[in-house]
Image: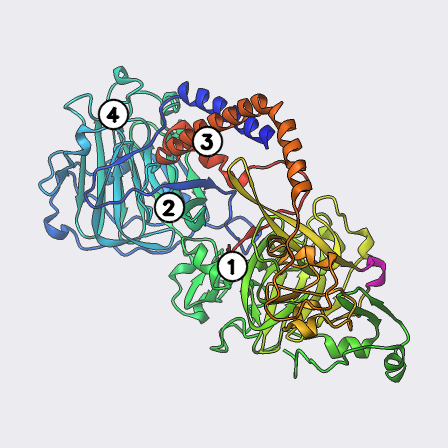
Amino acid sequence: MLYKTIHWSLLFVCVTISSVFSHEEYFYKIITPGNRVLDVDIITLPNMRTKRFAEPLQQKNTSIQAPTDNVNGLKPSTPEPMDLDFPSITNKTLLEHNITISKNDSHVYYNSTTINNKSVFDKYWVELTNHPNANIHKSLSDSHRAAATLSLKFQFPFYGHILNSTTIATGGFLYLGDYIYSWLATSQYVAPLMANFDLSTTNETNIYYMDNGTAFTVTWHNVVLQDKPDVGGFTFQTTLYSNGNIVFVYKHLPIKIQDIIPFNHPVKIGLSDAYTIENTEYFMRRKTIYEYHRIAFPMNEITNGTVILLTPLPTCLEKKNCTSCMKKDIDFECYWCDNRCSSGVDRHYQEWHKKGCRKLKLNDKDICSTEVTPYTIGTPEPLDLDFPSTITNQTLLDHNITNSKNDSHIYYNSTIINNKSIFDKYWVDLINHPKANIHEMLSDSHRRAATISLKFQFPFYGLLINSTTITTGGFLYLGDYIHSWLAATQYVAPLMANFDLSTSNVSNIYYMENDTALTVTWQDVILQDKPDVGKFTFQTTIHSNGNIIFAYKNLPINLKEINATNHPVKIGLSDAYVIDKVLFFVRRKTIYEYHRISFHEDEVTNGTVIILIALPTCMERKNCTSCMKKDINYDCYWCDNRCSSGVDRNRQEWLKKDCEKLKLYNNKDICIADKPIPTFNNSSGTESVKSESHTDSSHSNTSLFFITLCFSLIIMSTVWVLYAYLNPHTQSGQILIRYRPTQWGWNKGEARYTAATIHM
């Protein structure tokens, strides 16, 4: 405990020193009234787009309709500005217009053309400085690292999403995200030239904008770099069109863009989009933004007079019905789910996974032929409770079963059977059952767990359980307290191992419950350490009478070959009790395992069934007379209106009530009404305590020093964490986000689980 405290305190000191010497971060203040600035985490993903074709993308020749001229009184000083009528630019188009300096690119979501030609520049540059319908944004024109949101007069399609507003930033870009936060320059932008522009240093810098109902133009006029104010002013603009086209135009660039220093602010030219994942961490809701696509233009290609034309390509989101969605006519794999067409990687990513749409990629042949939900998932008469309470050799002979093994484990009798008819009797086919469910979150996770309530009370080691926690690691956790080390004890484990369901689309966890039984199937799950060995399929059923079934359908390797380095490998049951302790004024719970049943891995193969039959326990006795009968394999005692052997989940209460001392006395008359629990002379105990106190006094000074040191370090760490959490834009705040407590810990090889449902 002390070692850990010193370790993290040293980390705190290092972090504090690093934050003192850190440079200023590039965050933006939001000056639009009513906008709430959110605290978010930002993660850039590798390119997540899905292409249907392996060959290079071809240039699209989609015709774009031009609007009527002079919409909303648009009579600018430059001829025909904001022209929507530019085609998908091909080499032939460029030759017809005598344009030789150009570059064409396809970026999956957009086709782009970079042109250096005066006539093209004159065609697309919109002179807003003397336009009657243009506006100056006065707040931004006198600010540094500020942003303001404006509503658009049209709907702008961006990466297939329809947007109704945009946020103009002083840093030479538009932010098009759904959430306003301080790190606007990170993702979800349209950036003609993102850099550290400071408009507060001179009166000659301005941001102009104009919206005519079909196009929105923003000009950064004569803006100056904060790091290099002497190089001169930059003038450039971008135009967003109602059909999704985007134009970047550069009028005056006093220096090469590659010479701009990106130390205090990123320097970017291009587009970016991202999706947001909302999660709860330490009872606080947080949003994490994942960038899934970015277009970046080389800076050495941009000079005075350059024009960049970006034409959007078709996306799944534009398809409005299932039939058109499933056509293989664009460069994305589209799927119809939840009344929406998507490739699965867009701004609706979290909703897509929440609805289970990811699994549709496995079988999309008939998705449009029926209105049933994707996962109506059975076998006739499942979860059969009708097996004999005791399985004897005679029982096995009656059913022509010869390959079996019986064991008694005090709390349970077990029978291991390798017989096809027995397997067919107890295996519950949940894949095709109309009442079965897929747990979507667990089916796409590794080392995660989720708690579900039971429709019946399940007696486990004599204690009645009302809920169970399903884990990705091939076991059920039945403890009272949810913690990270679920694999340690209090489990029902048909096959506990390091299964990772996030690596395969075919891995699933199915579960089904009726009023007398719960069945959970781990279907086609894969080992993280040995993904190539194949898929495991097995299940467990827990019954309302306490009986438990393990059934194994497909085991691709001998279970002895499963690596137990990073995760325990177990087959069996376990239970434990919890002792509450107070250490250094901090309450801690210690879990003591008091019983375990373990089956040998070499006894389990394809088609094996393990039947565990619950034996009587003391806790089932509800009065003193029945409790004191010697008719089971335990010494039961009646204390505090409860029958117990003293070793069960109520162990601490048993000790607290001095029930353990009943074992020292003849229990013949213990059931006589109103007889008090015997009292004991504690003089010897008092002497023992005194001697311990005398021994402890010799070390009191040392203990006091270490306690004071620990408290000082804890207070310092708490102050820093509070400062970092309230100031996420600082270096301390970013380090706390990057190394947040969920990622702390030593790599000991234990199986640490993230609980999706907490019942503390």
Labels 4 and 2: the sequence-earlier one: 2
How many residues crowd mark 2 within 10 Å: few (<14), some (14–19), many (20+)?
many
Q: Which residue is mark 1?
A: 333
Q: Which residue is mark 4?
A: 198
How many residues crowd mark 4 within 10 Å: few (<14), some (14–19), many (20+)?
many
Q: Which-is-in-front pick, marks 1 and 4?
A: 4
- Helix, strand, or loop for circle 4? loop
Looking at the image, is 8 positioned above or below residue 399?
Answer: above
Labels 3 and 4: the sequence-earlier one: 4
- Helix, strand, or loop for circle 3? helix
Which of the pair 128/374 is nearer the observer? Answer: 374
Looking at the image, is 568 positioned above or below residue 190?
Answer: below
- Helix, strand, or loop for circle 2? loop
- In the image, 595: left or right of 152? right
- In the image, 80: left or right of 724? left
Extent of the magenta region? 599-604
Labels 3 and 1: the sequence-earlier one: 1
The residue type indicated by label 4 comes to: Asp
The residue type indicated by label 1 comes to: Glu
Which of the pair 618/148 is nearer the observer? Answer: 618
Q: Which-is-in-front pick, marks 3 and 2?
A: 3
| Residue 470 is at least partly visible in this image | yes
Name the quadrant containing residue 137.
top left
Q: Which residue is mark 2?
A: 89
**Mark 3 in CB contact with mark 1 (< 8 angstroms):** no
- Kindly identify which numbered label has been placed on residue 735: 3
